[in-house]
Image (cartoon, rainbow, N blue to C red):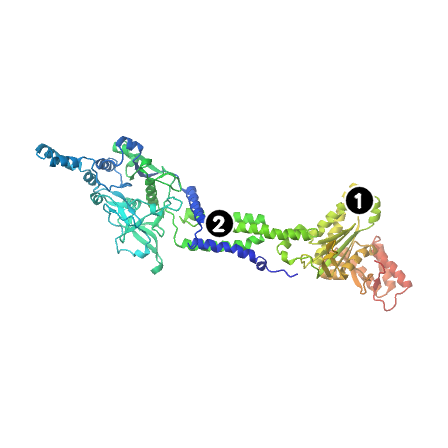
Amino acid sequence: MKKISFFKLHALRIALSLVIVPVLMLHVVGVLNLGFVARLENYAYDLRLNWTMPGTVDKRIVIVDIDEKSLAQQGHWPWPRNQVAHMVDVLFDTYQIDVLGFDVLFAERDQSSGLASLERLARDDLKDNAVFSQALNRLRPSLRYDDVFAQSLKNRAVVLGYYFQHGKMAQSKVGQLPQPILSRGSFVAQSVGAMQASGYSANLPELQAAAAAAGFFNASPLIDDDGVFRRISLLQAYDGALYETLSLAMARLALRETRVQLNFEGSGKAQALESLQMGQRRIPVDADVASLVPYRGRQGSFVYVSASDVLQAKVPPEVLRGAIVLVGTTAPGLLDLRTTPVQEAYAGVELHANMIAGILDGTIKERPAYVLGLELVLLLVTGLLFAVLLPVLSPLMATLSTIGLSAATVAVNLWLWNTAQLIVPLASGLVLIAGLFVFNMTYGFFVDARAKRLLARLFGQYVPPELVDEMAQDPGAYSLAGENRHMTVLFSDVRGFTSISEGLSPAQLTELMNAFLTPMTKIIHGHRGTIDKYMGDAIMAFWGAPLSDPQHARHALLAAMDMVVQLLALEGHFKAKGWPPIKIGVGVNTGDMTVGNMGSEFRLAYTVMGDAVNLGSRLESLTKTYGVQIIVSEFTRAAVPDFAFKELDCVRVKGKEHPVKIFEPLGLQDELSEALRQELALYQTGLQHYQTQNWPVAAQVFAQLQVQHPDCELYRLYAQRVLDFTANPPGIDWDGTYTFLTK
């Protein structure tokens, strides 16, 4: 039966496997939204981040914390601006910090000094009181707390914070925006996908004018779907200009840089923003001009000092000297807590601290545009490889391959993460690998395993399990229907079984037969043979069905020779049991046979029939006549040319018109001993004289062989035939064939 090709055999399975690949590719390009894959990707990102973050404290950046202690000692927030101004003076004058940033907003005027009430008294009730007016004029500058705060900001590296509003309903304009980092017309707006702000809440104009810079501190527009802050906008657009975030502005001042440049990839309409350039530092950004926050660890990865301690100058000088300082709050009541990959309740001010450290150290992870193409290629290659590979692997090998490929994918991904600061999506590849594995295992269980169980039910009693596994690769190629095939059949029979059985009890005989048939069956199965039936002490087997076997003659011959060798190995066991030794005769023939499920409607058996089968049975019977254990036909001999054989005779068995030459196999030609070669040459000479009716010479040769090998039944047989034919010649038309009239 012709075997079909691998791809035709597994076409349906491969096609169904490959359906998973385009589904994931469509998700990657954004056409199809697989929410669970996106959630898994976020989870994979968070795991990598938590596994690889340094977990150390960065002492370059100090957070002045408006904490519960500060609120208890200095009063609720907001504090009077003169108090904030005093803190600024202490930080710069006493502690000599480098840069100061405010993660708080000063959008409303400070009326806490009571100046408005005093001026109302001066206009009304005390307008004629010259002393009061003079005192008020003298105190007025110190009571204008906003001016006092503004004065403290001048000529110092101070960055104020503000926030942008987004959406059509948020269009208020409060306070004064700083100068944009990139003004309208200085860049190609279509190539920059920055978040578009619709309004803002900024600081008082006099404060903004006094500060060195300002940056927005709200990251909420880019919060992920699961509510986690993983990235921050570095630039946002308003009214055609680009404004910088608080962390970028502070890093810029710390690096003494005055401008930020845009780095693009591609050209023309395909141009896309790739990174920001600030002096020698390249800051990778995505399509939203946002960067992933390079978290150092859980909250507390930077030095925290209480704002109250700063106001009272209680902080050790070495903690703040030369530091980059952020003023923010961790007090729960001020609602500046965020959900992050490293901690559910994380101080918002520390987000900016992480970004500043990442900019200074160049540790911001990059996810460039070409990663999309890389992900698609990896999905395609992995999908094609696994779709073709998994159908041919065993469940164990498929499991090991899946684990191995998954581990390799994770290892390469982590290597890119750590060495190249490159983020390659991980979830889609792992989902593809897992999906293909689960599908193939399911398909194998419900489809292939079903076919295998059917084959095992049909052929399991005839062929070994390993051949059933092989047949299961192409279950449609095998059936029990009758067909003609070129095959090899083997018959074996125990010599003198009647006398053996008479000397044993039924239990002993059963045990003996099991001890004999089991190793014989294993040998036949080991050589890819099919057990046809056991006939008492006899075995019938064939090669070439149900599994096609181009080497069926060789395998049958090897099985026959191994059966004889195995009997010698069993002699010790049989002797220990008190059983008689067993000798067998084996007949092997090759030819065209009919094979299939045959019998009656009451009982069927998978068997072979035909003249070639009958000849095999006759050859087994002839082993007794010629005193050998194995006889093969000339057809089997021709199929195994590298073996050496002794020609036994040319016979016409009962039921056959045409004569056939029969042979005893001796082994591989290259392995014959010199003595055996000389014996064969002498025997062949005698046989030729016998076949040409040269009886005197033939008698002399066989007499010589009998002297050399007195136990050889074959030489005695031919010596007796020569005597008989000398007395009664067969006639001049005799062709050397010996005719047997019985089975």
Measuring from the top left, give residue 123's x and y in whole percent. 11, 37
Quarter of the image that includes the N terminus: bottom right
In the picture as drawn, the residue positioned furthest to the right comes out as 727
Where residue 509 is drawn, which disc sits there? 1
Say if 598 sits above or below 500 in the image: below
Nearest to N terminus: mark 1 or mark 2: 2
Where residue 620 is drawn, which disc sits there? none
- Tell me whether the residue at label 1 lies in contact with that at label 2, contact meaning CB atoms closer than 8 angstroms: no
What's the amino acid at mark 1?
Answer: Leu
Dot 2 alpha-carbon crowd within 10 angstroms: few under 14, some 14 to 19, many 20 or more: some
Q: Secondary structure at mark 2?
A: helix
Side (left or right) of 139 relative to 219: left
What's the amino acid at mark 2?
Answer: Val
Say if 306 sits above or below 555 in the image: above
- The total number of labels drawn is 2
Where residue 431 is drawn, which disc sits there? 2
Q: Nearer the viewer, residue 716 or 448?
A: 448
Spatial distance from mark 1 to mark 2, Cα to Cα?
61 Å
Dot 1 alpha-carbon crowd within 10 angstroms: few under 14, some 14 to 19, many 20 or more: some
Measuring from the top left, give residue 50's x and y in whole percent. 42, 42
Side (left or right) of 587 relative to 93: right
Q: Nearer the viewer, residue 552 or 704?
A: 552
Say if 586 sits above or below 348 in the image: below
Side (left or right) of 352 relative to 526: left
Quarter of the image that includes the C terminus: bottom right
Measuring from the top left, give residue 54's x and y in whole percent. 40, 41
